[in-house]
Image (tube, helix red, strand yellow):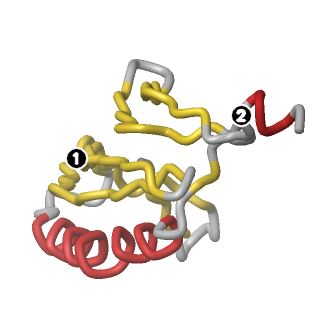
Amino acid sequence: MDWFAVDPKTNELKKAFSLIGYFTSQLTASIKDLKIVPQLGFIKQEFKLKSTEIGEFTTEPLNSLLNFAFDKGIVPFINNRAKDGFPIPAIPDVKLINPEISFQEKYLVVSTDVNYVGVKKEEHSK
């Protein structure tokens, strides 16, 4: 992530420094009322100084601020927005029994047993 500053002498935008960082989190999901309900868990993030044109400095205050912002603000906000879940396609008269969710590299798998709760044949013919 590059940061820039305006040179007061020339009014030109110049690169001040670059940061490199990572964000570690955990995502769990459950199925409730035919909706996938995700829950994001924050573990940590950390930025380090990659290069600088303005001199060395510590990134610890920035990391502390961002850890606080993620832990107390951003992650709870995301979880609150996602708490109602995301609907999954439903088949009429079919109930999901013991659904399980697994995460693959580029997709999500929902596996389940099913129970047909529709009208029985003999009831339909009456």
15 left or right, relative to 119 = left
99 or 122, nearer to the observer = 122
Q: Position of residue 101 (x, y in %)?
A: 37, 34
118 or 6, nearer to the observer = 118
Which numbered disc covers residue 80?
none
Which numbered disc covers residue 24?
1
55 or 72, nearer to the observer = 72
Instruction: Determine crowd level at label 1: few under 14, some 14-19, many 20+ residues with C-alpha closer than 10 A.
Output: few
Q: Position of residue 55 (x, y in %)?
A: 20, 58
Q: Residue at x 42, y 38 (%)?
A: 97
For marks 1 and 2, give the one nearer the viewer. Answer: 2
Mark 1 vs 2: CB contact within 8 A = no
Q: Residue at x 64, y 51 (%)?
A: 87
From what the image shows, is residue 101 above or below residue 7? above
**Mark 2: secondary structure:** loop
Q: Quadrant of residue 113?
A: top left
**Mark 1: secondary structure:** strand
Q: Amino acid at mark 2?
A: Lys
From what the image shows, is residue 79 above or below residue 30? below
Q: Residue at x 50, y 30 (%)?
A: 114
Q: Position of residue 16 (x, y in %)?
A: 39, 57
Residue position for label 2: 120
From what the image shows, is residue 73 above or below residue 28? below
From what the image shows, is residue 10 above or below residue 49? below
Q: Residue furthest front?
A: 126
Q: Residue at x 21, y 55 (%)?
A: 45
Q: Amino acid at mark 1?
A: Thr
Instruction: Determine crowd level at label 2: few under 14, some 14-19, many 20+ residues with C-alpha closer than 10 A.
Output: few
Q: Earlier in the sequence, mark 1 or mark 2?
A: 1
Q: Residue furthest right?
A: 125
Q: Position of residue 33 (x, y in %)?
A: 53, 58
35 left or right, relative to 15 = right
